[in-house]
Image (cartoon, helix red, strand yellow):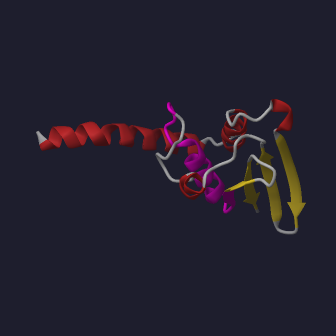
């Protein structure tokens, strides 16, 4: 009975990890899709969602900014962790997958609140 209960709990996790690995192998536009989707779902008016790209001496910085409600401190702390979601139907894999893809390319991903309200996702790629 214990083995059955463990298998029922671990099987969905294993499946999600497998799906994440498949997406990480084919990451075309996936990071931007997830970041833009989150911005659109933030409650931000569509015309206040902005994307910027800046070339720096050793890479590029891409920012996705919205004017939604922003994120509580505990959400900022945990947003990039696997299976953490504030959405009723969220899997908690979107931002974690973004972080893994960016880090696989030797980059960094961060999430912060914006002055004046909203959130800012910043990724740096070499």
Residue 98: percent from left, percent from top: 62, 48
Looking at the picture, tell me which residue is in the foreground, 126 or 54: 54
Looking at the picture, tell me which residue is in the foreground, 27 or 54: 54
Q: Residue at x 67, y 57 (%)?
A: 109
Q: How many marks?
A: 0
Looking at the picture, tell me which residue is in the foreground, 22 or 32: 32
**Magenta residue check for 83:** no
Q: Residue furthest left?
A: 1
Asked if residue 75 lies left or right of residue 112, the reply is left
Q: Quadrant of residue 87?
A: top right
Give the quarter of the figure containing the C terminus.
bottom right
Looking at the picture, tell me which residue is in the foreground, 5 or 79: 79
Residue 83: percent from left, percent from top: 46, 45
Q: Residue at x 84, y 42 (%)?
A: 50
Position above or below: 100 against 4: below
Give the quarter of the figure containing the N terminus.
top left
Q: Which residues are magenta?
A: 88-110
**Magenta residue check for 98:** yes
Residue 113: percent from left, percent from top: 72, 54
Asked if residue 24 lies left or right of residue 40, the reply is left
Residue 30: percent from left, percent from top: 66, 40
Asked if residue 4 lies left or right of residue 116, the reply is left
Q: Quadrant of residue 2?
A: top left
């Amino acid at each position: 009975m214990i083995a059955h209960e463990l298998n029922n709990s671990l099987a969905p996790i294993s499946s999600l990890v497998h799906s994440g690995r498949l997406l990480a192998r084919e990451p075309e536009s996936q990071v931007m899709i997830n970041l833009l989707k989150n911005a659109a779902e933030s409650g931000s008016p569509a015309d206040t969602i902005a994307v910027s790209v800046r070339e720096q001496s050793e890479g590029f910085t891409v920012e996705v900014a919205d004017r939604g409600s922003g994120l509580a401190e505990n959400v900022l702390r945990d947003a990039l962790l696997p299976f953490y979601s504030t959405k009723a139907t969220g899997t908690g894999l979107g931002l974690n997958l973004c972080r893994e893809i960016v880090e696989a390319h030797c980059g960094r991903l961060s999430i912060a609140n914006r002055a004046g309200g909203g959130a800012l996702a910043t990724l740096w790629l070499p």
